[in-house]
Every structure is written in structure tokens, then in C-alpha cells.
Image (cartoon, rainbow, N blue to C red):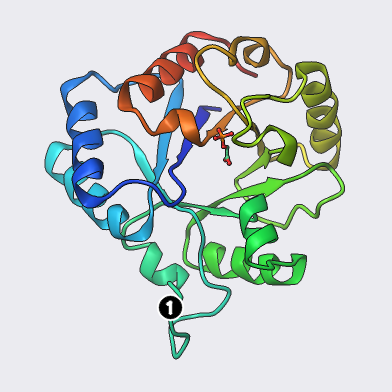
Amino acid sequence: MKKLLAANWKSHKTADQTQAFFNKLTEENISFSQTELVICPSYPSLSIAARIRAEKQLSLSLGGQNVSAFPEGAYTGEVAATQLAEFAEYVIIGHSERRRYFGETDEILAEKVKQAIEANLKVILCVQDEQDPIFNGVDAVAFEPVSAIGTGNPDDPDHVAQVLQRLYEKNSAVRLLYGGSVTPDTISPYLDLVHLNGFLVGGASLEADTFLSLAQLCDTQNLS
Ligand code: PGA
């Protein structure tokens, strides 16, 4: 099973900044044998990224950070899964910022997952712990404790190991990721964790050099 290194850009990067990031990736050798890179830009940047990927034949995946709980139709401001699937292979669903600032409940998330899977998108589902439901058909589950997101204080690796174990017992078929203040300086204690198949990275994914350093570290380590 390949590892996943997913970049969650959140509401960052203009069109020009997106172009610059992808130009940088084009200059570097981004072929990693063990690791799949997934870049999740904002919607406008996603179409730019998809165009550059096609032009430069970059070997990476693209993802959305959110998707509508509804199909295509009269839902102002929403992007349906079928529309997203024109540009992306993945979608992040249930990020704690979506749950917290946009009131996304388990019921809404279940609908989003259903729409995404019907559109053949692979779902990266974010959870707070093993109590959160893991919806059928998701591709990866990212354990992302709120206290670690964007704080510079990644979760204690022993605690991450315990939660991963419980998530694995709940569902051994999905890839398990960790997210929360992962940087090239903080990543090493997690690289050896049993059941860990990759990372979801926010802040440290915004600079191409830093993101590529993370990819290198993942690729040379034997994640389970
Ligand atoms: P961070 O964000 O890497 O900036 O902590 C992770 C996330 O929110 O997915």
C-alpha cells in the first residue's frame, strides 16, 4: 500500500502563487516510489493545478477540501462532487474547521461522503478520535486532534499510536493518517508508527521545498 502525503492548503494561495508552487514541483524530480502526493488547493486554484498537471505531466493527485452534501442542482455556492471530480481524485471531508466553523454534523458528513463516493472521489475523512464515525467506503482516515492543528504542538507520538491502534481495530481496511503541526522537524517520531500510512499537512505544505522535504522523508521511511 502506498503512503499518502496530502497537502491541505486551506484558504491560502492566489492563482499566481499556485502557479509558482507547481512551477517549482515541475523543476524538481517529484517521482516518489512509495508515496502518493495529494495537493488540495482551494476551488479556483484547483482548476489551475489540474491544467498545469496535465501540461507538465506531473505525477501527483489533486483533491478538494470540501464538497457539497447535495448533487448538482439549485444549491447556490456549493460545488457538487461530480463537478469536483472533473479536476480531482480526492476530497477531504470532516476537517475540524468544517465541523467547527461551518456546523458540519455527522449527518451532513455522511451525505458528503455518499456524494463523493458516487462521483468516484476518494475520501480522506478527518476524525478527532476513534469515537467519530468512520463512514463506509472512505479511502483514508486522518486523525487530527484540534490541539495540534496549526499550533506548532504536534500530538504526543505515543498518544497518536494508541489512537491509530483503536482506529485500526475499528476499520483495518482504510489508510490511517496523522495530521497536526507536521513539519520536516517534527515528522520523525511518527514515521515508525505501526498502522500509520501517511500525513495530512497544512502549514508545512504551502512552500514547495518544505512539502518536497516531507515527501522525501516519507518515501525513505518504511511506513506500515
Ligand atoms: P497544520 O494543519 O499542519 O497546519 O497543523 C493540518 C490540518 O489542518 O490538516
**Coordinates of residue 35 in the picture (x, y in percent):** 45, 24
Residue sitting at x 51%, y 60%: 66
Mark 1 lies on residue: 77
Residue sitting at x 62%, y 63%: 113
**Coordinates of residue 181 in the picture (x, y in percent):** 60, 28
Tell me the quadrant of the picture where the C terminus can be found: top right
Asked whether 194 or 211 is in front, the reply is 211
Question: Please, which residue is most extreme toward the front here?
Answer: 151
- Height in image: 64 above or below 25? below
Label 1 near ligand 1 (CB < 8 Å): no
Tell me the quadrant of the picture where the N terminus can be found: top right
Q: Where's ligand 1: which quadrant? A: top right
Q: Secondary structure at mark 1?
A: loop
Residue sitting at x 78%, y 30%: 164
**Coordinates of residue 203 in the picture (x, y in percent):** 48, 33
- Height in image: 126 above or below 191? below
- Height in image: 146 above or below 136? above
**Coordinates of residue 107 in the picture (x, y in percent):** 75, 71
